[in-house]
Every structure is written in C-alpha cells, then in structure tokens.
Amino acid sequence: MKYRSRNIAQTESIAAKLAGSLEDRRCVALYGELGAGKTQFVRGLVAGLGGNPRAVSSPTFVLLNVYTAGTTTVHHLDAYRVAGSRDFEQIGFSELLEQDGVIVIEWAEKVADLLPPRRIDVRIEIISASQRQITIERIG
Ligand SMILES: Nc1ncnc2c1ncn2[C@@H]1O[C@H](COP(=O)(O)OP(=O)(O)O)[C@@H](O)[C@H]1O
Ligand SMILES: [Mg+2]
C-alpha cells in the first residue's frame, strides 16, 4: 500500500491506521534516510495503539525505548548506530521477539538478518520538505 503524506499529522494518522490493522504481526521495520520521518511514524503508531505519542523519542543513543500503549507494550529500537546484528543480539533482540508486545525498528536494514519473516515493512521516502511517500508492505 502506498500513501502520500503532506505533513506530520498525515504521517501520524497513516501510522495510527496501521496500528489498528497489525493483527498478529508484532514487528514493524522502518526504512528511510535520516529525517525521513521514522520516529514521527512511531509516534502515530503508539498513539494508534492507545499510548502517548509525546513519550516517543529517538532511541538513537539508548538503542531501545519502551512505552506502554493501551493494553500492549511497544519496544522501539533504532539500529542507526549499531555496527551490525551482533550489537542487537547483545541487547536481547531475539528474546524481545519472543515477548508479547509490538516491536518497531528504525534503520531495520542494518539488522536485516535478524528480522522475523512475518513482519510489516514501512519505507518512507522524502519527496520534498513536507511530503513523504510511505509504502507499507506485509511480509511473510
Ligand atoms: N510529511 C512529513 N512526515 C513526517 N515528518 C515530516 C513530514 N514533513 C516534514 N517532516 C519533518 O521531518 C522530520 C522527521 O524527523 P524524524 O521522524 O526524527 O526522522 P527519522 O526518524 O526518519 O530520522 C521532522 O523534523 C519532521 O518535522
Ligand atoms: Mg529516528
């Protein structure tokens, strides 16, 4: 599914809509360059799950943020600064995948080999200063 977002609010509402259709899929992999809107997308996802979007911040330096959202837990990871999959394994990524809750990963391409085969891929492309193309694909 392809969407065009013209502002932050639209990106958030596209993400919130996805939150309502995750079904049994618990892993959302985000792709897109710096400033594309990945963290903004996570805000919409958390809001859509019943959480507080203002609690969302970029986990670039801490690798993992955890939010309560409605009845679920959101694990928010950012692989931007990881050297490779081993860093992710060390923070217990495989164990996270086995727990309940939603996992959303920025810079998912950096840990491609660790991603579960059933997941949702979200690609965000910068079209202009305020426009984004968002492609959402159910994998597996
Ligand atoms: N349509 C849009 N959707 C999302 N972000 C947008 C949009 N238009 C402008 N922006 C800006 O782009 C930046 C996205 O930042 P962020 O979500 O932190 O990106 P990333 O996590 O991909 O590095 C923010 O400064 C935001 O205000
Ligand atoms: Mg980010």
Image (cartoon, grey):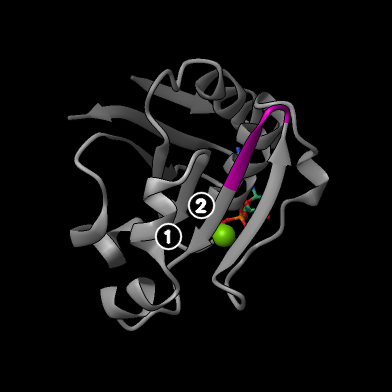
| Residue 31 in sight in this render | no
Q: Is residue 4 magenta?
A: no
Q: Nearer the viewer, residue 106 or 63?
A: 63
Beta carbon of the mark 1 residue lies under 8 A of ligand 1 = yes
Q: Nearer the viewer, residue 133 or 106?
A: 106
Query: Magenta part mainly helix, strand or loop?
Result: strand
Q: Which residues are magenta?
A: 70-74
Which residue is painted at 38% across and 49% down in the image?
97
Q: Dot 1, how many residues are within 10 Å of its Cα: few (below 14), some (14-19), or many (20+)?
A: some
* Residue 117 in which image quadrant: top left
Residue 68, x across and y down, in percent: 72, 42
Q: Is residue 73 magenta?
A: yes
Which residue is painted at 51% across and 52% down in the image?
36
Which residue is painted at 47% across and 16% down in the image?
21
Q: Quadrant of the N terminus?
A: top left
Residue receiving disc 2: 36
Q: Secondary structure at mark 1?
A: loop
Q: Dot 2, how many residues are within 10 Å of its Cα: few (below 14), some (14-19), or many (20+)?
A: many
Residue type pointed to by label 2: Ala
Residue 16, x across and y down, in percent: 61, 24
Q: Which mark is residue 56?
A: none
Assess whether mark 1 and mark 2 are in contact (beta carbons under 8 angstroms): yes
- 57 lies above or below 16: below
Residue type pointed to by label 1: Glu
Q: Secondary structure at mark 2?
A: loop
* Distance (Cα) linking label 2 and label 1: 5 Å
Beta carbon of the mark 2 residue lies under 8 A of ligand 1 = yes
Q: Which mark is residue 33?
A: 1
